[in-house]
Image (cartoon, rainbow, N blue to C red):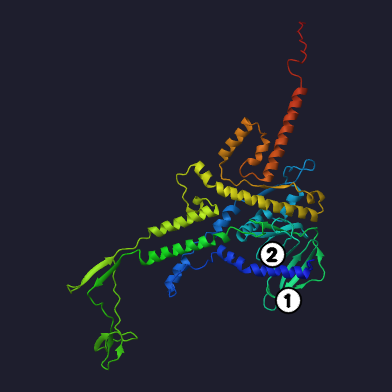
């Protein structure tokens, strides 16, 4: 039987972080624009190195931000008690109260960006003085162990580093198993002999490890891959092409003028009567060419611009110019690399090239189909992870129904770009032609939030109650035709 003692688990998890440290750090560097240098000659000067620095065109944030900005959880639908189907979402449900308490409206984006960048991120659910909350954890600081990493949602152990070692101060970490939490200290990730685990663990309040993995993609071997690592070679290709473009633009994109058959003017210096160099015109008695360290004459700089005219007295002198080198092929190569990037990453080309002129609505929809499919895949993967977070939070809060709720679903906000007029026209046709209840289409209105939806329902119920009361009063009030006629009194003359 494998050793599952807290000390053994802590060492194994720290060893995983040490193993993946270099790979994750390289991914992080690429996200922040610290890419591999493009190829340049070994004897490259400072000008070359400056061009290489300016050649970096960081496309990685767009690669992460495009799908991440379309991922936004807007509600949670608990499973029905009778039929098991998801019930209507409510902003007053315990699950959504936990979400708001954790401030996940704003913090959920960091969880998605971490998972898309590194391949996975984590969410820790724990009890605090303010109640049960959840918070995101970085893949660079957190590792988890699974019996079957490809199919299991529940890790049997997880560790997250809360403080890195500094000098003689050891690092700190938190270790979680299925029941308890332990305090861990260590001197470095590679020094497993320095790992110390607290003797007594404290209960974290759940029957499962309270750390949930958010994976952008998991294969059958349990490996997680984000959107950044597969695109690194293509990012390097784009940087190399832009570097070559900058070099060509700097050195060959202008005409080079030349003159043959003439000696360049030399720099002169004054000498005094003793033959020493002087800077005082009063002491100068002669002049001579200035020499460099090797004893060669130093040519004078030629101050030439568009307003100056070159001439020479010697008839054998010839002037000419070399044509500029073309840079159009390099520009086309950059466009081709960006198109390859768009195809491989399933990013619409107009998101990267900015070319949206003369595109019909159908063409734009076709261009974004691949991106929509990728976003739908992420929603399916991340939605299952959020449902586990809600179940663990319910268990910590003593909500038995929520703990056993495997039919709940998260509601993803519709982030598709549509005008309100288009949406209203489509929803009106669905209601009139297909007979779909109008209230069932309210959630389809672009940009509507859960609170607004509940306000609409309450106002509709108030309007219905007012209408029912008015109808009841009308029915209870006799009409003028059915009321008995009033007696007519005739005036009697006195």
- Closer-to-camera residue (61/7): 7
Question: In the figure, 65 relative to 438: above or below?
Answer: below
**Secondary structure of residue under mark 2:** strand
User: Is residue 326 at least partly visible in the picture?
Assistant: yes
Residue at coordinates 53% horizontally, 44% vertically from top-left?
365
**Secondary structure of residue under mark 1:** helix
The total of numbered circles placed on residues is 2
Residue mark closest to the camera, 1 vs 2? 1
Residue at coordinates 62% horizontally, 34% vertically from top-left?
430
Residue 458 in the image, given as x and y percentages of width and height: 72, 39
Left or right placement of residue 231 versus residue 311 in this view: right
Q: For the residue carrying disc 1, how many other residues have a C-alpha within 10 Å: few (<14), some (14-19), or many (20+)?
A: few
Mark linked to residue 162: none
Left or right placement of residue 470 versus residue 305 in this view: right
Question: In the figure, 427 relative to 176: above or below?
Answer: above
Left or right placement of residue 311 versus residue 454 in this view: left
Residue at coordinates 59% horizontally, 53% vertically from top-left?
67
Quarter of the rendering occupied by the C terminus: top right
Q: For the residue carrying disc 2, how many other residues have a C-alpha within 10 Å: few (<14), some (14-19), or many (20+)?
A: many
Residue 470 in the image, given as x and y percentages of width and height: 73, 28
Question: In the figure, 51 relative to 422: above or below?
Answer: below
Instruction: Find the residue positioned furthest to the top.
Output: 493
Quarter of the rendering occupied by the N terminus: bottom right
Residue 49 in the image, given as x and y percentages of width and height: 45, 71
User: Is residue 72 at least partly visible in the picture?
Assistant: no
Label 1 sits on residue: 193
Label 2 sits on residue: 142
């Amino acid at each position: 039987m494998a050793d599952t003692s807290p000390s053994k688990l802590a060492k194994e998890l720290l060893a995983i972080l040490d193993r993946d440290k270099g790979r994750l750090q390289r991914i992080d560097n690429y996200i922040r624009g610290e890419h591999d240098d493009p190829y340049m000659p070994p004897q490259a000067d400072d000008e070359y190195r400056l061009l290489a620095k300016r050649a970096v065109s960081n496309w990685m944030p767009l690669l992460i931000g495009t799908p991440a900005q379309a991922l936004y959880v807007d509600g949670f639908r608990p499973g029905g008690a009778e039929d098991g189907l998801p019930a209507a979402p409510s902003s007053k449900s315990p699950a959504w109260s936990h979400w708001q308490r954790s401030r996940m409206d704003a913090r959920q984006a960091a969880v998605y960006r971490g998972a898309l960048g590194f391949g996975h991120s984590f969410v820790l659910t724990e009890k605090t003085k303010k109640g049960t909350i959840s918070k995101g954890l970085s893949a660079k600081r957190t590792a988890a162990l699974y019996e079957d990493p490809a199919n299991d949602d529940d890790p049997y152990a997880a560790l997250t580093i809360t403080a890195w070692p500094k000098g003689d101060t050891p690092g700190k970490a938190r270790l979680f198993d299925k029941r308890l939490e332990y305090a861990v200290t260590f001197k470095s990730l590679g020094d497993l002999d320095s790992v110390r685990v607290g003797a007594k663990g404290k209960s974290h309040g759940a029957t499962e490890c309270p750390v949930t993995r958010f994976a952008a993609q998991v294969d059958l071997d349990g490996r997680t891959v984000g959107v950044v690592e597969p695109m690194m070679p293509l990012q390097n290709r784009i940087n190399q092409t832009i570097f070559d473009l900058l070099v060509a633009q700097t050195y060959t994109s202008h005409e080079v003028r030349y003159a043959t058959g003439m000696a360049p003017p030399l720099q002169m210096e004054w000498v005094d009567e003793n033959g020493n160099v002087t800077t005082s015109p009063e002491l100068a008695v002669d002049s001579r060419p200035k020499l460099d360290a090797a004893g060669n004459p130093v040519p004078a700089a030629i101050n030439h611009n568009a307003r100056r005219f070159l001439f020479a007295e010697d008839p054998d002198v010839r002037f000419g110019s070399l044509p500029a080198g073309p840079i159009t092929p390099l520009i086309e190569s950059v466009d081709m690399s960006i198109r390859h990037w768009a195809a491989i990453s399933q990013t619409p080309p107009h998101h990267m090239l900015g070319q949206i002129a003369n595109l019909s609505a159908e063409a734009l929809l076709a261009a974004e189909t691949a991106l929509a499919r990728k976003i739908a895949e992420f929603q399916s993967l991340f939605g299952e992870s959020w449902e586990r977070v809600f179940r663990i939070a319910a268990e910590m809060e003593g909500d038995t129904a929520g703990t056993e709720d495997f039919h709940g679903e998260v509601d993803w906000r519709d982030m598709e770009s549509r005008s309100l007029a288009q949406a209203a026209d489509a929803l009106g046709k669905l209601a009139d032609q297909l007979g779909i209840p109008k209230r069932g289409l309210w959630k389809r209105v672009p940009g509507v939030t859960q609170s607004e939806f509940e306000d609409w329902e309450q106002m509709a119920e108030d309007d219905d109650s007012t209408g029912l009361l008015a109808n009841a009063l009308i029915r209870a009030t006799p009409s003028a035709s059915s009321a008995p006629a009033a007696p007519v009194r005739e005036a009697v003359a006195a």
